[in-house]
């Protein structure tokens, strides 16, 4: 059973300010919570779940802080439209140290504002073995509940940092920077790469002129139809499928 103070505390973590203060984020649903519990290095602090989920996952819950709650209580603390059996409070990841780009593919996101897009890009990166992602300060918060849900657990395997991208790119010596664009070298004609920085632009504005000027290569996905553009996450997936 949840006391009123705990209920309010969990509800407060729906806001970025309180998530940052507490260093926690919310993860919901059987698949996501189970994946985080099984992933090495993930600190799941507290779990609130229905009795049937607890009974089904007893082996995973040894030495865990688990509270059995009712469906009504879960509905009160859930950030989902349809609450799903379990909610966990998870410690945010330590992403303060610098990223090494040598010998790796790194994704850079320029003001990706839709939480679903950000979460999907993290998941796509994980699929293609890209385990580091650099976001501008204008991107959605990586610990937003919609981002976490969209990653489907990949948040535990892809490192995400926020920085001034322009200054960061200027410090990346001898690493090719690829800018996704409506015009440029067709990725279908390119060889796969083992290292490089790939910039994905804002959903409506694309890559800012300042960042575009810092790119060594302009790349594009050839089109056959009449659509004006591609969803940022879709474009990211297509680019990585050709280049990674």
Image: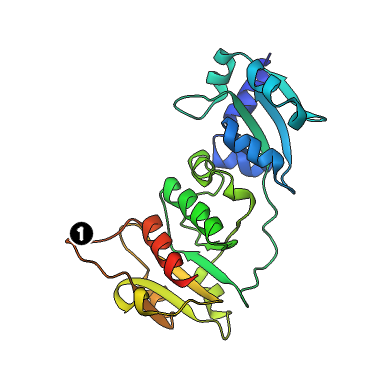
- Front residue of 79/219: it is 219
Hey, which quadrant is residue 54 in on the image?
top right
Vertical placement of residue 92 versus 136, above or below:
above
In percent of width and height, residue 165 lies at: 51, 69
Q: Say which residue appears at 57% left-offset and 20% top-offset.
A: 74
Q: Is residue 135 among what the camera can see?
A: yes
Q: Is residue 50 among what the camera can see?
A: no
In percent of width and height, residue 154 lies at: 58, 49
Mark 1 residue element: loop
Hey, which quadrant is residue 62 in on the image?
top right
- Front residue of 36/161: it is 36
Q: Say which residue appears at 20% left-offset and 66% top-offset.
A: 224
Q: Say which residue appears at 34% left-offset and 65% top-offset.
A: 206
Label 1 neighbour load within 10 Å: few <14, some 14-19, many 20+: few
In percent of width and height, residue 233 lies at: 40, 56
Vertical placement of residue 207 versus 6, above or below:
below
- Front residue of 31/48: it is 31
Q: Which residue is mark 1?
A: 227
Vertical placement of residue 181 versus 176, above or below:
above
Q: Say which residue appears at 59% left-offset and 45% top-offset.
A: 153
Residue at far right of view: 63
Residue at far bottom of view: 174
Vertical placement of residue 218 versus 80, above or below:
below
């Amino acid at each position: 059973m949840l006391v009123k103070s705990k209920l309010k505390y969990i509800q407060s973590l729906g806001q970025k300010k309180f998530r940052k203060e507490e260093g926690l984020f919310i993860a919901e649903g059987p698949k996501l919570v189970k994946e985080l519990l099984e992933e090495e290095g993930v600190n799941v602090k507290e779990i609130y779940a229905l009795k049937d989920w607890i009974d089904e996952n007893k082996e995973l819950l040894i030495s865990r802080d688990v509270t059995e709650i009712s469906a009504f209580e879960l509905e009160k603390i859930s950030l989902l439209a349809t609450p799903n059996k379990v909610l966990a409070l998870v410690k945010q990841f330590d992403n303060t140290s610098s990223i090494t780009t040598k010998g790796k593919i790194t994704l850079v996101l320029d003001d990706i504002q839709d939480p679903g897009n950000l979460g999907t890009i993290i998941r796509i990166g994980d699929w293609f073995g890209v385990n580091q992602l650099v976001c501008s300060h204008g991107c959605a918060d990586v610990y937003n509940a919609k981002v976490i849900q969209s990653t489907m657990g990949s948040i535990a395997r892809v490192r995400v940092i926020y920085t001034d991208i322009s200054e960061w790119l200027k410090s990346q010596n001898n690493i090719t920077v690829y800018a996704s664009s409506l015009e440029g070298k067709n990725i279908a004609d390119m060889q796969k790469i083992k290292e490089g920085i790939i910039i994905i632009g804002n959903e409506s504005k694309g890559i800012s002129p300042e960042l575009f000027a810092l790119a060594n290569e302009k790349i594009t996905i050839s089109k056959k139809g009449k659509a004006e553009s591609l969803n940022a996450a879709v474009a990211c997936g297509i680019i990585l499928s050709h280049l990674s």
